[in-house]
Image (cartoon, rainbow, N blue to C red):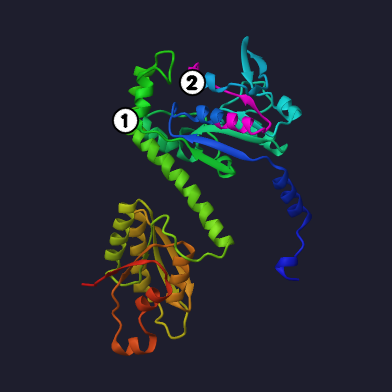
Amino acid sequence: MSDKFKRCTPEEALEKIKKSNRGHLKIFLGYAPGVGKTYKMLDEANRRLIRGQDIVIGHIETHKRLDTINQIKNLSIIPSKKIIYNNTDFYEIDVDAIIKRKPSIVLIDELAHTNAQGSKNIKRYEDVEEILSNGISVITTLNIEHIESLNLAIRRITGVKVTETIPDCILDSADEVVLIDISPIELQKRLKNGTIYIDGNASHAIKNFFRKNSLNALRELSLRLTAEGVDEDLAIYMREHGIHDNWHTVERVMVCISSNANTKRLIRKGVKIASRFKCDCYVVNVVCTSVFSKKQSQRDREILDSHHKLAKQLGAEIVTLTSKNVFKSLSDFAAEKHITQIVVGSSRKTKAQYFFTGSTITKLVKYTKNVEFHIIPGD
């Protein structure tokens, strides 16, 4: 039976049904508090309300900011659930009330929040997952400081240990991620003007999390993160629609290496190019399985190992391919990864070898589209 008409298993069918019934998750992402995530979320909600969509507020944190409070306008609010813990009143999302009301869309601020003890779920993102599974779409907000995989990087940049984090898979599962971006200078102005912290903590904050260098680094992290997400979506789209052309949306460098001693020069050149564009660099060698190819000696393997060690030290990704056809394997890899720049060494083949096997570089140029080549001469 062909794959087109192949029946799915009961488990696969159930998974498809779950996905089809699941709500849509949209995240407004920021690189720091005060960039305007909640304001933008409320602005979109009001536009949706005017268009007649059934949208409500499940939880909102105004932080006493007048601009944010004024943005609530005519939006309905589902009251929070009061939880008493250690003789203190806490107000958390009423998940059951939201599910019972069953709006089309619910706004839930601060996705990484930890719920008070006694709540239905430990973390707010668990509340959101439960609401989504009931077919209700969620619009929420998140700062990159709360993404688990970036936790150590955030601490190095800001000196602040962030304890509330969400698993990366929550962000990956989002149907839409919108980056709310303003310049660090503008953000510092908001801080000094008292727009972000009403209680007068601006001077303390600007010496820690809101230092200009820290904000620049956090902003770059957020831009890279969202760019990677867009790039993955584009790759999926191109794959699904059979698009093989290279659209050059992101630079990617491939270095073709062998057991030649001069290969270290190629690796350094490739990494230097990738560093300039702040992009991925792949160091690729092909183990040729053709009966006519020269077999690797122990010395060849030792040299390749040293090349791999250098590539790893320089932060490149090492890839080993196995194929009877070296140039086809390399061109297929370049197409799969949407490589934009290829670094190769000039060939040392004899005239006889050229006559029988041709030039790998010439073949690569012929079979790769829209790729820039850097041919590095040997000593």
Between 309 and 317, the one nearer to me in the picture = 317
Q: Specify whether residue 110 is in view.
A: no
Task: Check residue 51 for magenta coloring.
Answer: yes
Identify the residue at image location x=30%, y=77%.
347
Q: Point out which mark residue 339 bears.
A: none
Vertical comparison of 257 with 58: above or below: below
Picture coordinates of residue 276, whole percent (x, y):
30, 53
Give, as a single range, the part of the protein colored magenta.
Answer: 44-67
Picture coordinates of residue 152, whole percent (x, y):
43, 37
Task: Check residue 84 for magenta coloring.
Answer: no
The amino acid type of the residue labelled 1 equals Lys
Identify the residue at image location x=41%, y=38%.
153
Q: Name the residue carrying label 2.
A: 67
Vertical comparison of 274 with 71: above or below: below
Name the residue at the right extreme.
Answer: 10
Q: Earlier in the sequence, mark 2 or mark 1?
A: 2
Picture coordinates of residue 377, whole percent (x, y):
24, 72
Vertical comparison of 74 with 317: above or below: above
Q: Residues within 10 Å of mark 1 (few under 14, many from 20)?
A: some
The amino acid type of the residue labelled 2 equals Asp
The image quadrant where one finds the C terminus is bottom left
In the picture, measured across the screen, residue 199 lies left or right of residue 98, that is: left
Q: Name the residue carrying label 1.
A: 212
Of the residues tagged 2 and 1, which is closer to the observer? 2
Vertical comparison of 211 with 352: above or below: above
Identify the residue at image location x=37%, y=27%.
187
In the picture, measured across the screen, residue 89 lies left or right of residue 344, that is: right
Picture coordinates of residue 226, whole percent (x, y):
47, 44
Helix, strand or loop at mark 1: helix
Helix, strand or loop at mark 2: helix
Identify the residue at image location x=69%, y=36%.
136
The image quarter containing residue 358 is: bottom left
